[in-house]
Amino acid sequence: MPAASPDTAPVIGVLSLQGGVEEHLAILEQLGAHTRRVRLPKDLDGLDGLILPGGESTVFDKLARTFELAEPLTAAIEGGLPTLATCAGLIYAARELENPASGQQTLGVLNVTVRRNAFGSQRNSSERTLTIDGETVESSFIRAPIVTAVGGGVEVLASTQDADGEDVIVAVRQGHITAVSFHPEENGETTLHVAWLRGCRS
Ligand code: GLN
């Protein structure tokens, strides 16, 4: 995508409580978007899009509740803010977790059930090539979750095979929310960000 001019570039927030924030910011800036770190409710004002990065979903939950950010995040996303959720971001967005940590809460904005750490431990990280909306996406799976059930309004974008050779869902879309199990921000990959940014108006 050619770099947008500064006047028309969308303002994209990245949830910046913990996790893979810098990688998303770097890609967004490379693609010509304005960026903002989202830590407090006021950081959501006037955004054209939001990224929930990878990291540790239990930490997102604890810190967002501490900073009174969880409810404003839910309201903004339910209000139609285009959102890209990656790995822990998918977990944090999900309506239901099969295996939550003790007391773990989620935003509940994405009508899916998710299993955390579904590919095993860190040692089972892998690189895979997926096709999403007809485009090739190089994807890094790191302690990745899977989607085990989808509710109404959710479209499956990609599946892959788990260690047992079973097909498992790793990318979904629910209207303005795109959510993936993997890290699309590693190894210079930008395809998913480019496609998602097209849906973020400035
Ligand atoms: N397992 C992590 C969690 O539960 C997600 C891992 C990741 O984002 N790479 O949040």
Image (cartoon, rainbow, N blue to C red):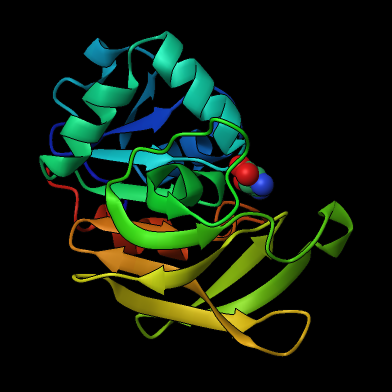
Q: Position of residue 27 (x, y in %)?
A: 48, 44
Q: Position of residue 149 (x, y in %)?
A: 42, 72
Q: Position of residue 18 (x, y in %)?
A: 58, 25
Farthest residue toward the right? 123
Between residue 118 and residue 194, name the one nearer to us. Answer: 118
Q: Residue at x 52, y 37 (%)?
A: 26
Q: Residue at x 10, y 40 (%)?
A: 79
Q: Position of residue 21 (x, y in %)?
A: 54, 32
Between residue 181 and residue 187, name the one nearer to us. Answer: 181
Looking at the rendered structure, the number of numbered marks drawn on it comes to 0
On the image, which quarter does residue 59 sit in?
A: top right
Quarter of the image where the C terminus is located: top left
Between residue 105 and residue 20, name the one nearer to us. Answer: 105
On the image, which quarter does residue 13 sit in?
A: top left
In the picture, measured across the screen, residue 29 lies left or right of residue 48, that is right
As drawn, 17 above or below 169: above
Q: Residue at x 73, y 69 (%)?
A: 127
In the picture, measured across the screen, residue 176 lies left or right of residue 132, that is left
